[in-house]
Image (cartoon, rainbow, N blue to C red):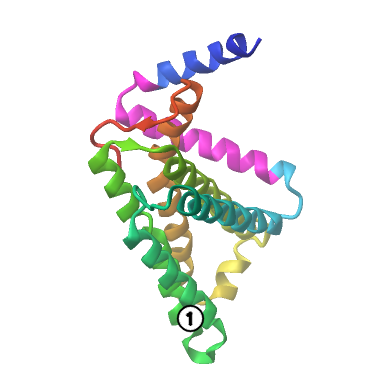
């Protein structure tokens, strides 16, 4: 039963793998839009997507903590990625600083958008990702997608009013662009993670050129 149910999925994954990179990118966009529409129809209170995104992020951090406690090592995890994430968090905590709120929030959004790049670069160099790190980055990708979906759906709900409430100029669209960039940076890795899981491989092997 389990093997039979996996066959169609493996067939689809195999077909996607054989497609050129541009076709895979287009498929990723189509699937993302379909998932966004699905979430918009199923989740009535779109603020719950933000809660789910933060919960997923907390799960990812818990995976890293568990790895540290169990294996007494952080091998495979990038210190720079954690440092960038910490800088983004500190900027977010500075929200109550009145006039500087926009500057700190902008810094938080932009740093968070690229915080995962050192981690992905490290995995690209090794091309072999052990399970705990793979789980962490995948959950981070899920969190980024949910956060991006939250922003997009809130803009749709308010018919663009949210962008006006956030300010004027380039700042509002740059927030959305940063969220979308985060999502697509992790999309390629998430694809290979899902492929590895359905292939029954505990250790994720990345081909050269990913990210």
Per the image, is 30 magenta? yes
Count of marks placed on residues: 1
- The image shows residue 182 at horizontal and vertical percentages of 42, 53
Name above or below for residue 34 compared with residue 105.
above
179 up-or-down from 166: above or below: above
* Residue picked out by circle 1: 102
| Secondary structure of the residue carrying numbered label 1 | helix
Res 170 visible: no
- The answer to whether residue 161 is magenta is no
- Circle 1 packing at 10 Å, graded few (<14), some (14-19), many (20+), is some
Q: Position of residue 94 (x, y in %)?
A: 51, 82
Q: Return the x and y of residue 120 as percentages of the image width and height.
A: 33, 47
Image location of residue 66, percent across then percent down: 53, 51
Quarter of the image holding residue 14? top left
Range of magenta residues = 17-40
* In this view, 82 is above or below 199: below
Q: Which residue: 57% across, 86% down? A: 96
Q: Quadrant of the C terminus?
A: top left
């Amino acid at each position: 039963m389990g093997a039979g149910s996996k066959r169609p999925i493996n067939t689809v994954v195999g077909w996607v793998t054989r497609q050129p990179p541009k076709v895979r990118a287009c498929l990723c966009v189509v699937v993302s839009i379909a998932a966004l529409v699905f979430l918009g129809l199923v989740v009535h209170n779109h603020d719950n997507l933000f809660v789910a995104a933060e919960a997923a992020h907390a799960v990812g951090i818990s995976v890293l903590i568990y790895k540290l406690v169990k294996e007494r090592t952080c091998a495979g995890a990038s210190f720079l990625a954690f440092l960038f994430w910490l800088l983004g968090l500190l900027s977010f905590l500075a929200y109550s600083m009145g006039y500087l709120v926009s500057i700190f929030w902008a810094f938080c959004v932009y740093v968070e958008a690229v915080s995962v790049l050192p981690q992905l670069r490290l995995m690209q160099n090794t091309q072999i990702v052990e399970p705990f790190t793979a789980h962490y980055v995948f959950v981070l990708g899920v969190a980024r997608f949910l956060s991006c979906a939250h922003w997009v759906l809130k803009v749709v709900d308010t018919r663009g009013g949210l962008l006006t409430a956030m300010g004027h100029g380039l700042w509002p669209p740059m927030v959305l662009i940063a969220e979308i960039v985060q999502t697509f940076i992790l999309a390629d890795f998430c694809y290979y993670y899902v492929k590895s899981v359905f292939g029954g491989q505990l250790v994720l092997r990345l081909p050269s050129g990913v990210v």
